[in-house]
Amino acid sequence: MERDELVALITAEVIAQLKKAGWKAPDKPVPPPFAPQEKAEKKELPPDFDIASEEVKKIPLLENPIDPTELSHMKKRTTARIGVGKCGARLNTQTMLTLRADHAKARDAVMKDVDENLLKSMNLFSVKTQCDTKDTFITRPDLGRKLSEEGVATLKEKCAKNPDVQIYAADGLSSTAINANLDKIMPVLVKGLESKGLTVGTPFFMKYGRVAAEDQVAEIVGAKVVCVLIGERPGLATSESMSAYIVYNAHVGIPESKRTVVSNIHKDGLSAVEAGAYIVEVIEKILAAKASGVDLVK
Amino acid sequence: MSKILSVGIDIGTTTTQVIFSRITIDNTASYFTVPRISVLDKEIIYQSPVFFTPLKQQVFIDGDKVRDIVAAEFQKAGFQPSQVDTGAVIITGEAARKENSKTVLDTLSDFAGDFVVSTAGPDLESVISGKGSGAYQYSIDNLCTVVNLDIGGGTTNIALFDSGKVIAKTCYDIGGRLIRLDKDGTIQYIAPSAQLIADQIGARIAVGSKGDVSTLSRITDAMADILAQSVGLKEFTPLAEGVRTRTSSKDMLRQPIERICFSGGVADCVKSTSDDLFAFGDIGILLGRSIRSNPYFAKARQIEASQTIRATVVGAGTYTMNLSGSTIYYSRGIFPLKNTPVYKLPANVEEAVFKGEGQPLMEGLEWFMSQSSSSQIILAVKGPHNPTFQTLELAAGCLVKCAEAVLPADAPLIVISEEDIAKALGIAMSNASDKKRKIASIDSVSVEDGDYLDIGSPLMDGLVVPVIVKTLLFG
């Protein structure tokens, strides 16, 4: 049965029942608050369109909205999946598939490894925590906070000792974030800090790393300030978001409240270069105040 | 949190007004992200009565009397000129074309504090009144296009906003006091644009003769019609072009307008159902009636202005100041700067700069400096989105080299960008320079070629600077 026929049938039935209950039909049909506007022309999408792309998500799936312009305004305000319509009590197939595609991207960000070529091109050597697989990394957060013996040895061997600032990158929960931002943020960080007359330690990459591993790094290299650039747990909106956790005079077991964080670094949040420039200033402030986290008076 | 005292002084064709407002700014970002300094509140703390603008022989503004009004209002409000942080004194509408408007601004300069716009032009007025009327905020809150028509005594200032962006602005010589009558209904004054419209539609009016309602209504109907044309509700005619204010922008975008808003003194007349059609001794009430009954305006969806007759002064007092982005770079002591001209890099020059080619910029800059009387300049770029630092270093190298070659040794190198890249670009420029020249890099401000900027002293622990974008009328 066609949708319109169904609607007509249900309407007729509802009116019949209402009349039985003593309701009188108005003389003239009551117009809706806004007259339904003409159907917006549907853009033809190429046959191979990506349902998870920003462009496709912008198109409302809801059929015959009362006010399509207002709906498009509402959609501009949020990345939430509004105006997607429904089929009975369920989501439309396309909405369902988009959700699953976004979820798959988020899982990929967690499960994939950081691009080796990127690390090579940036001259970063790698160390590992005590996790040897992604599964261990995810199920044993405690191991992701401790360097492997080999990792400790490598840092001792390759890293310059007692720098003002030690910067390194870790995959954390999004390798995608590191792939997208690391080469953009590192140059401005290093050059910015050096132009302030600060010594910057030998940068490296830590695989299967969680934030608190930076405390052990601080102890090994003897840095005054450690800054880890780490992938944030991805959501369904972006998987490219990176954070910087910065800590002064760290030691293993230092309270989390001593960390200063700059989050939401990605192309639609704070751009990587601008984040780098901002972090330079934050580190300068931390060194001057000899404090980080909540101790750093704003 | 910082509080800024702002003054707005509007000297219009018909009325002169003063307001004081308190602007509150604070960091609205969470502890875990970069700071984001925003305007939290704009509170009007004092507004003057609406004064008639004192004139001498129709063509001059009586500067001394205006000064007296302003001085008395400062006293009534309880403020000293030295307490004022920002704001604007603007002479608007036909008044701006009075012979002595520049002199009048000069007599007011000591009331203007250290950091005040003292000039406007029809386009800027359109934007200011559209912000003061609430049309601008409505377009942000509802993400839609709103056109504001500020219908004053001598001009109608029109601005089109789309979700908080100014997308078109223009001005027409149409207003409520283009024809003035005395108590007996004898016509005392006819402005040139009113005469032009009357001649075109074959309505006979003359100074000294009686003004009858039906003839004058025909003229105001034609005026309302021209306004409908000006916002694209009706086909544009040569007559409309004939009464467009000469110094305003011609290109009103013909884009679907979702809401329409009226401000200015005549906006009150649009709603008024007064029987006394000449209560103000002019055609304001008739013009209001004509707009109300115009079939083209009737089709548009109207919104209520939050300010009508005070829209311009409220806009001048509270909306002329912008805040820069919160991640910027500047050498110590470089601000405040006043009346600094903007050179907006043409797209091809900007593209070359971000590729590291400085020659086109060198040529453009040399030309601009030879045309400009100022030894200082602000370079404006759009800037790339999410660039690499290498790209910024290439641009920084070019910018520094061109500054060395073209700018005087003591002139600062100031770059203003639309994209959020200022702090990184600042670091790159500083690294590329010999550190002798002062450098500033500011972002999240949109400017046009030919604008002039005032940049105030840094606020909120130096995180942001206040920026006033202006177009000089008496350049």
Image: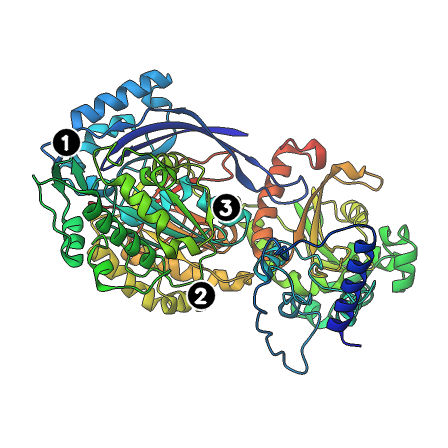
Q: Earlier in the sequence, mark 2 or mark 1?
A: 1
Mark identifier at residue B354: 2
Q: Which residue is outermost to the bottom?
A: A47
Q: Chain of mark 2?
A: B
**Which of labels 2 and 1 is toward the front?**
1
**Which residue position is annotated with label 1?**
B184
Callout 3: SS: helix
Residue type, mark 1 in image: Asp
Measure the alpha-carbon separation of dots 2 and 3.
37 Å
The reply, left or right, for residue A185 in relation to residue A86 is left
Proximity of marks 3 and 1: CB atoms separated by less than 8 Å: no
**Which residue position is annotated with label 3?**
B138
> Residue B471: in sight, yes or no?
no
Measure the alpha-carbon separation of dots 2 and 1.
69 Å
Give whichever of A155, B22 is nearer the camera. Answer: B22
The reply, left or right, for residue B468 in relation to residue B463 is left
On screen, A224 above or below A210?
above
Quadrant of image for the N terminus of chain B: top right
Confirm whether circles 3 and 1 share one chain.
Answer: yes
* Residue at 80% across, 60% down: A16
**Which of labels 3 and 1 is toward the front?**
1
Callout 1: SS: loop
Q: Earlier in the sequence, mark 3 or mark 1?
A: 3
Give whichever of A83, B452 is nearer the camera. Answer: A83
Question: Looking at the rendering, which quadrant does residue A288 occupy?
Answer: top right
Categorize mark 2 by other alpha carbons within 10 Å: few (<14), some (14-19), many (20+). Answer: many
Q: Chain of mark 3?
A: B
On screen, B308 above or below B226?
above
Confirm whether circles 2 and 1 share one chain.
Answer: yes
Give whichever of A5, B173 is nearer the camera. Answer: A5
Residue B247: x and y in percent read 22, 53
Residue B347: x and y in percent read 38, 67
